[in-house]
């Protein structure tokens, strides 16, 4: 997230508002992909933690459980033993916070991109 925030600040410093709409749209799309990759990395780290603790039988199940928990979907078809349940609650809280932060960053990027749209339309006329 820190990397994505720095990247977004740099992109704004490059006077992206003066760039073509497709360039600005590509920046927003790249930001979304970076944030999605960060989500996958973090959920994978949780899955590795579950596996190292032997809280789940294999990595595939750990990854599945981690993604379902991180996104707060919570199917309940895979559950942790009592001694590890607090970890899943912490992961869910972490996921909520990270999705909120991701949403905030995407909104900032979209506002930055759309700020110049009326001026561009006037220039086209």
Image: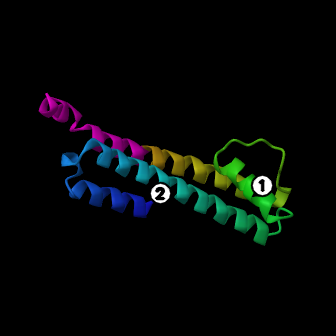
Say whether residue 113 is magenta.
yes
Expressed as whole percent of the image width and height from the top left, the position of residue 66 reads: 71, 55
Expressed as whole percent of the image width and height from the top left, the position of residue 112 reads: 28, 44
Which quadrant holds residue 72?
top right
**Residue drawn where x is 53% and y is 49% of the image:** 97
Which quarter of the rendering shows the N terminus? bottom left
**Residue drawn where x is 71% and y is 48% of the image:** 68
Most extreme residue toward the front is 125
Query: Tag 1's secondary structure?
Result: helix
Query: Tag 2's secondary structure?
Result: helix
Left or right? Give the position of 62 relative to 18.
right
Say which residue label 2 marks: 34
Packing grade of label 1 (10 A; few <14, some 14-19, many >=20) is: few
20 and 15: which one is in front? 20
Packing grade of label 2 (10 A; few <14, some 14-19, many >=20) is: some
Left or right? Give the position of 12 relative to 83.
left
User: Which numbered disc, 2 or 1, marks the residue that appears first in the sequence?
Assistant: 2
Expressed as whole percent of the image width and height from the top left, the position of residue 56 reads: 83, 62
123 and 75: which one is in front? 123
**Residue drawn where x is 42% and y is 53% of the image:** 30
Q: Where 24 sits versus 82, above or below? A: above
Which quadrant holds residue 83?
bottom right
9 and 31: which one is in front? 31
Say whether residue 17 is magenta.
no
- Residue stretch in magenta: 104-125
User: Of helix, strand and loop, which mostly describes the magenta segment?
Assistant: helix
Q: CA distance from mark 2 to mark 1?
A: 30 Å
Give residue 85's mark: 1
Which quarter of the rendering shows the C terminus? top left
């Amino acid at each position: 997230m820190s990397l994505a925030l720095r990247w977004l600040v740099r992109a704004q410093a490059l006077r992206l508002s003066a760039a073509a709409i497709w360039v600005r749209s590509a920046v927003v799309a790249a930001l979304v992909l970076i944030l999605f990759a960060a989500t996958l990395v973090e959920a994978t780290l949780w899955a590795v933690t579950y596996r190292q603790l032997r809280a789940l039988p294999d990595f595939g199940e750990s990854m599945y459980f981690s993604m379902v928990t991180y996104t707060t979907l919570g199917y309940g078809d895979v559950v942790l033993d009592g001694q590890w349940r607090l970890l899943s609650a912490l992961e869910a809280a972490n996921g909520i916070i990270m999705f909120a932060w991701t949403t905030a960053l995407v909104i900032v990027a979209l506002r930055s991109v759309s700020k110049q749209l009326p001026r561009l339309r006037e220039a086209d006329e």
